[in-house]
Image (spheres, rainbow, N blue to C red):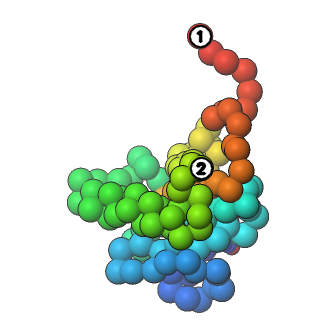
Amino acid sequence: MPTLFEKIVAGEIPANIVHQDDRVTAFRDISPQAPVHVLIIPNKPIPTVNDVSEDDERTLGHMFVVARDIAKQEGIAENGFRLIVNCNQHGGQVVYHLHMHLVGGRALGPMLAGEKHG
Ligand code: 5GP
C-alpha cells in the first residue's frame, strides 16, 4: 500500500507543493504548528530513520539543501527555524514515510515539551 506521502509525490493527493525535484518533494503541512511549516520528504518511501541506508546519503543530504533554500524563500533563514525528524512511537511519528519538518516564522521556545532529565 503506498503511503499518503507517496501519493502526494505522485500527484494523486493534492498538496501545496513548494519544491519538487528528482529526489525530494516539499509541501506545506496540512496542520501547521507555526507560520511556516513545510514537510520535506524523499520521493523514495523510506519508512523511518531506522530504515535509512548508506545508499540514501545523497538524498538525505539533499533534504538539508532544500530546507536551506525553502527557509530563505520563506524569509525565515536569518531569524532561524527548526528542523525535526520524528521516529517511531516515542518520537511521535504518525506518517511512516520519513519526513523533515521545517518550522519557523516565530520564536519556537524550548526544544522539547515536558520534564528535564539530568
Ligand atoms: P509526524 O508526526 O509523522 O512527524 O508528522 C506528520 C505530519 O504530516 C503532521 O504534521 C501532519 O499534520 C502532516 N500531515 C498528515 N496528513 C497530511 C496530509 O494529507 N497532507 C499534508 N500536507 N500534511 C499531512
Quarter in which the C terminus is drawn: top right
User: Measured along the vertical axis of the image, is residue 83 above or below residue 1?
Assistant: above
Please state the quadrant of the image where ligand 1 appears: bottom right
- Mark toward the viewer: 2 or 1: 2
Q: Which residue is mark 1?
A: 118
Residue drawn at x 59%, y 73% is: 27
In-image side of 72 versus 62 (left or right): right
The percent coordinates of residue 80 (x first, y second) are: 57, 49
- Labels 2 and 1: the sequence-earlier one: 2
Helix, strand or loop under label 1: loop
Q: Report whether the residue tagged 2 is closer than 8 Å to ligand 1.
A: no
Residue drawn at x 59%, y 89% is: 12
The percent coordinates of residue 47 (x first, y second) are: 47, 59
Q: Which residue is mark 2?
A: 79
Foreground pick, 46 / 84: 84
Figure quadrant of residue 37: bottom right
Q: Looking at numbered disc 2 in the image, what kind of residue is underneath it? A: Asn
